Amino acid sequence: MKVALITGGSKGIGFGIAEALLKEGYKVAITSRTIASANQAASHLVAHGDVLAIEADVTDFKSQQGAVNLILEKWGQLDILIANAGVGHFAPIDELDVDLWKETIDTNLTGVFYSIKATVEEIKKNKGHIFTISSLAGTNFFAGGSAYNASKFGLTGFTQSVMLDLRKYGVKVSTIMPGSVASHFNDHQPNAENDAWKIQPEDMGKLIVDLLAMPARTLPSKVEIRPTTPKG
C-alpha cells in the first residue's frame, strides 16, 4: 500500500494527479481550502479508489499538520506528497497590490515549505517521494509576473535544495515545471475546444505515475513539461 497527499487536489492538476494515482491503486488524500470543494471532488474520485477529502490551508502550518494526522489515523502511513496548491496574480509592479504579493508568496512558496515540514518525517520513514508543482515561470521571467515569478523561481530553488537534503535518506524530491495547462488556474474556466492545445490534467497525472515508477537508483529532480504545439 502507498498513500499520497495532494494539496489543492479538488480540481485541475491536483485532481488529474489524484485520479491517475487512484487508478494505479494508491490511497489518496486531497486537500482544499473548503471541505465542500474537497468532498465534491472526492465524490467523483471515489469511483477509482480509496480517497480522503480534507479541509486544509497550505498557508497555515497547523492546518497542514492536521491533514497529516487525519491521513495517519485512516491509513497509518504517508509515502508521497504532491505540493500542488497555488495561486496566480499578475500585474506590473507599480500596480501590484501588496496583499496579492503576500498571498502569492505565502501560497506558492511558504505553503510548500509548510507542506513539506508537516510530512517530511513520515516520508523519510517510508523512503517516499515529494513532488512540488512549480512552473516554466520558475526559470523564465515575464512582464507583469513579478509576484508569480518570484514565488516559482523561489520554489524551484527551494525544491532542489530540499532534494539535496533528503536524498541521503532515500527520499526522492522532484519539481515539475509545466507550461500552459487546461486548468482552473487564475480563475480560468477550462474549455475543451479552446484548451485542446494545452497540457491536460490527466497528462500531469500520467507524468507523476511514470516518475514514481522510475527505478530506485534514478532521481528525476527537475522536469519541464510544455505543450507539444504552442497556441498559433
Image (tube, rainbow, N blue to C red):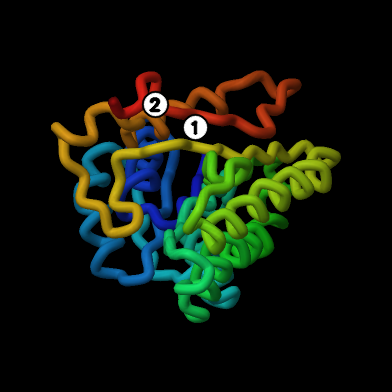
Give x and y (percent) for residue 134.
55, 46
Q: Nearer the viewer, mark 1 or mark 2?
A: 2
Whether residue 38 appears in this view of the structure is: yes
Inspect the image, locate mark 2, and give the three-letter code of the amino acid beneath it: Pro
**In the image, residue 20 lies at what x, y percent?**
37, 33
What is the spatial separation of the Cα atoms under label 1 and label 2, in whole angstroms? 17 Å
Secondary structure state at the residue bearing disc 1: helix
User: Up-down: is 53 above or below 167?
Assistant: below
State the residue position of label 1.
Answer: 208
Residue at position x 58%, y 47% in the image: 141
Q: Secondary structure at mark 2?
A: loop
Q: Decide which of 159, 191 is in the foreground and name it.
A: 191
Quadrant in the picture for residue 54: bottom left
Residue 84: percent from the left, percent from the top?
A: 48, 51
Say which residue appears at 66% left-offset and 46% top-offset. Answer: 156
Q: Quadrant of residue 131?
A: top right
Judge whether 146 appears above or below 160 on screen.
below
Camera-nearest residue between 117 and 74: 117
Q: Which mark is residue 227?
A: 2
In terms of depth relative to the viewer, which is nearer, 94 or 217?
A: 94
The count of marks equals 2
* Residue 90 in which image quadrant: bottom left
Mark 2 residue crowding within 10 angstroms, few (<14) / some (14–19) / many (20+)? some
Residue at the spot 50% in from the left edge and 53% down from the top edge: 143
Q: Which amino acid, mark 1?
A: Ile
Relative horizontal placement of residue 85, taking residue 122 as reference (left or right): left
Q: Residues within 10 Å of mark 1 (few under 14, many from 20)?
A: many
Task: Determine if residue 132 is in view.
Answer: no
**Furthest residue in direction right, as rendered:** 168
Left or right: 35 as drawn, with respect to 209: left
Location of residue 203 in the rendering, given as x and y in whole percent from the top left corner? 37, 28
